[in-house]
Image: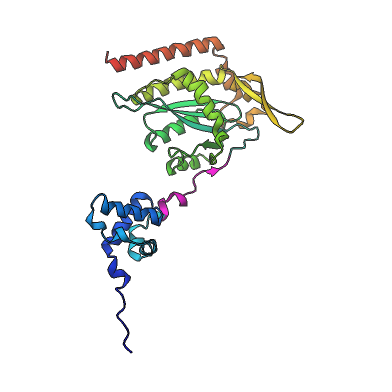
Amino acid sequence: MKHGKRGAPFATKYTPKDIALLAKTDLAHQKLSGPATKEIFRRAYDVFEQKDFMRLSSISSSHLYNLRGTRQYTSETKYFSKTSPTKTNIGERRKPQPEGKPGYLRVDTVHQGDNLVRKEKGVYHINTVDDVLQWEIIGAVETICDRDLVPLLEALIAQYPFRILGFHSDNGSEYINRQVAKMLNRLLIHQTKSRPRHCNDNALGESKNGSVIRKHMGYGHIKRSEANVITKFYTTHFNNYLNYHRPSGYATIITDAKGKEKKIYKTYQTPYEKFLSLQSPEQYLKEGVTLEQLKKESMKQNDNEAATEMQKAKQQLFHSFRISSTGL
């Protein structure tokens, strides 16, 4: 009995060129689902009239997954296993638990707005706040790419007088990436990131963004080229004022008869005073830093003198923005 002719083998219907197009598409879109990739192929052929996608435009999902299993596809997309976000475990997803100890930072980015007329990007403020003390160190960068951000983050961490043990941010790619992780690992700092649908995980950082940065720097556009002079202002005047001369409110948690917790704010101290209130605060200091040095720094000026000097420096800073923008 004669057997009928077998259908054309799988490999002859979809050529190496088709597999290469699939690999290129998957690399560009970071490997979408089969149906989504099929739609891209259909649009390529029907909408954008790309003739090379003629065969792939009618591919079934099962055949698409078969192509993804070929040796050629694996070879052309082999670095997926190194770069796919699903394979990268940077930062633990949890809320920091400092247990009353300093050294656990909340980190957030504040963008100073774009100039839509000139199509200029604004400067970025990088805000770091200790979870327990509310000790705050701020800087500014032109962009939030690794080249600008990583050196600034390291410089901000270096300004803290106590050891930094934790670094918590939201899930923004400026913080959740290999370069930041590498820097934090080198400094032996544990990295965590906010959990999905837990908007309060980084509430302290976001609160300080409004009450400190927006209050003093406003919402108007500032050119990103001003990042260095802004960072100099923060380092020379503003950070010192925040930590030694500006009182912050510290919550006391009260539990009622029904077990419901409520925060009340009766304690107001500077972050420096809060640090001194800890049991044996010297145990948290970095090597080479003493309590006597911190006390000397705190007593250089009284609060009003420090605030007045900071405000004067801020006025000069904003005046320099106007001179720069007018070209005078």
Relative depth, front residue between 161 and 5: 5
Q: Determine whether, in the image, residue 59 is placed left or right of residue 130.
A: left
Residue 97 at what x, y percent from top left? 62, 37
Specify the quadrant of the image occupied by residue 69.
Answer: bottom left
Q: Which residue reaches farthest right?
A: 257
Q: Looking at the picture, how far across and down is residue 1, in whole percent?
A: 33, 90
Along the line of sight, the residue nearer the viewer: 141 or 252: 252
x and y percentages locating residue 150 in the rendered image? 42, 36
Q: Name which residue lies at 48% across and 31% down.
A: 108
Residue 287, visible in the rendered structure: no
Q: Is residue 320 left or right of residue 314?
A: left
Q: Is residue 308 visible?
A: yes
Image quadrant in which you'd find residue 174: top left
Q: Residue at x 46, y 49 (%)?
A: 88
Q: Residue sitting at 63 percent across and 19 percent down?
A: 268
Against 84, residue 12 (above or below) is below
Residue situated in front as seen by the camera: 194 or 90: 194
Quarter of the image where one finds residue 244: top right
Q: Which residue sits at x=37%, y=58%? A: 78
Question: Was residue 71 drawn as part of the magenta stretch in this picture?
Answer: no
Q: How many marks?
A: 0
> Residue 191 location in percent, x, y?
53, 40
Query: Considering only vertical position in the picture, is 23 above or below 121?
Result: below
Q: Residue furthest bottom?
A: 1
Q: Any magenta on residue 91? A: yes
Relative vertical location of residue 257 with respect to residue 243 in this rendering, above or below: below
Display colour scheme: rainbow
Q: Which residues are magenta?
A: 81-94
